[in-house]
Image (tube, rainbow, N blue to C red):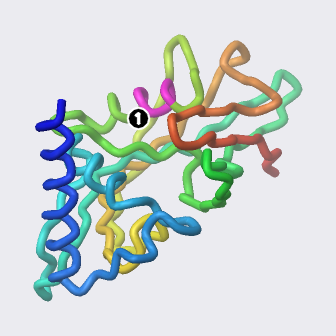
Amino acid sequence: MQNLEQSKKDALSILRQQLESAGIDVSEWGKGQAKTLAHLQKEIESGETVLVKGEQGELLRRVLVCGADIFYISPDGKKYRLKEYKQVFKDGRERRRNLGQAVSEKMKPGEDPENAMIRGVREELGIEGEISLVETGVEEQLLSSPSYPGLQSQYIRHIFEITLNDQQFKPEGYLEEQDDKITYFVWEETK
C-alpha cells in the first residue's frame, strides 16, 4: 500500500515538473474553478487526456470528447432543450460552464464516439432504455480551459443530437453525483 502511495506521489511530482518546465504555473490549480494536479493525473492515467507538443512546441492537453444537444418534445408539441446549470464541488466551490451541449463526455481509449456519448448520457443523467442519437458533426477547438489554467486544451468534439422519450423526461431536471461534485441539469423551453 505504501508503494502505491509513493508511486502516486512520484507520478504527481513528474507531472508537476513537466508542466512547470513548459512554463505552466500550477499554483492556482485547485482554487476557484480550477481542478487539481491530481485531477489531471487521473485523466492521463485513464486515457481520457494525453499531453502532446503543439505546432509551436507548446504543451497541449488533447481531449477527444462527445457532446450532445438533448431535447424533449412534449405531447402538446412544446420543445425543451437540456442544459448544464451548475456544478457544486464538495468543498463549496461552484462553477457554471457553457459547454455548448448539455452533456459532454471524454472518450476512453479505443471507444467510438457513439458508444462514448451513450455512456455519458447514462452516467450523467441516469437515463435508461434506448437512446436515439444522430451525429451532426465534428469540430476541433484550441481553448484555455478554466479547469487547468495556463495549459492549452485541444478538444476534438463529436457532436450529437438526442431526443428523449416520455419515460426518460424528468421535468425537474437531472443530478449527477460524483465523489467531488454534483452537477445540475435543467430544461429550457425553446422557440
Quadrant for residue 12, please give it: bottom left
For disc 1, the neighbor class at 10 Å (few under 14, some 14 to 19, many from 20) is: many
User: Residue 122 magenta-drawn?
Assistant: yes
Q: Position of residue 40 (x, y in %)?
A: 31, 56
On screen, residue 94 above or below 42:
below
On screen, residue 75 above or below 58:
above
Which residue is disc 1 drawn over? 117
Number of numbered tags placed on the structure image: 1
On screen, residue 97 above or below 117:
below
In this rendering, would 123 be left or right of 94?
left
In this rendering, would 71 be left or right of 63?
right
Q: Which span is picked out in magenta?
A: 118-123
User: Residue 51 magenta-drawn?
Assistant: no
Q: Position of residue 47 (x, y in %)?
A: 20, 44
Q: Furthest-front residue in view?
A: 2
In this rendering, would 14 be left or right of 16?
left
Residue at image coords 21%, 74%? 19
On screen, residue 158 above or below 73:
below
Residue at image coords 72%, 23%? 169
Residue at image coords 82%, 30%? 172
Quadrant for residue 114, please give it: top left
The kind of residue tagged 1 is Met
Q: Position of residue 78 (x, y in %)?
A: 84, 36
Q: Main secondary structure of the magenta part?
A: helix
Q: Furthest-right residue in view?
A: 76
Q: Secondary structure at mark 1?
A: helix
Residue at image coords 41%, 35%? 117
Q: Position of residue 122 (x, y in %)?
A: 50, 24
